[in-house]
Amino acid sequence: MLFLLYVNDITHVSKFKTTVFADDTVLSFSAKSVIDLKIKVNEELNNIDNWLKHNKLSLNYNKTHYMLITKQKIPLNFDMNININNHIASKVDNVRYLGVVSDNKLSWNSHIAQVKKQISKACGALSRLRHYLPINSLLTVYYSLVQARSHGGAFGGSAPQISFVPP
């Protein structure tokens, strides 16, 4: 709680749309062109960097990325060169935030692929465990590993009720 109070004013130091959850922060910005975006983002990142220094905080540069979402055609050789404190942020095509994978095309494909992979692993574990655990324990494993990923997550609460009848 004290950390949140400490970093709460980050939303007021720049023109970024800022989303903060615990110690994760997402900065969003829009502009009419990618060139304007590059200039403005680097200016605002300078404000963020000054705020970090003033508050004696550091940034994990290995976890600092940017994702460009646009309908504009961008030349292949165009370099956004997003820079904070002389560190270049790497460009990514998708990001994971609060368990949801978003991609630069705003499709659900990356998120669905990730959930399918997690559920597939959980089903493999359940298949191996079925020889060793009673049905009520298998159901507990199912609810925690499969149902939570397929019906809950960031979307929460609207999952249908599923009942299992032991053989």
Image (cartoon, rainbow, N blue to C red):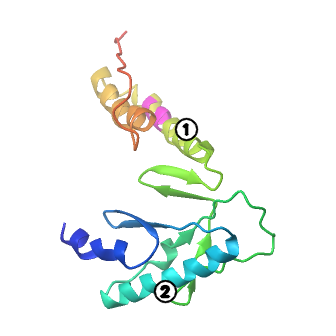
Magenta residues (range): 122-126
Identity of the residue furthest to the front in this view: 32
Please give the residue where the numbered disc 1 appears in the rendered image: 116
**Whether residue 127 is situated above or below residue 12 in the rendered picture:** above
Q: Which residue is mark 2?
A: 46
In front of the other: 91 or 132: 91
41 part of magenta stretch: no
Callouts 1 and 2 close, C-beta under 8 Å: no
Q: Residue at x 45, y 34 (%)?
A: 150
Where is residue 77? Give x, y as percent.
80, 75
Query: As rendered, which of 54 and 29 lies closer to the eye?
Result: 29
Separation of disc 1 and disc 2 at Cα? 39 Å
In terms of secondary structure, what is the magenta stretch mainly?
helix
Q: Compared with residue 136, is residue 21 higher up or lower down, i.e. above or below?
A: below
Q: Earlier in the sequence, mark 1 or mark 2?
A: 2
At x 35% / y 75%, what residue is drawn?
A: 12
What's the residue type where badge 1 is placed? Answer: Lys
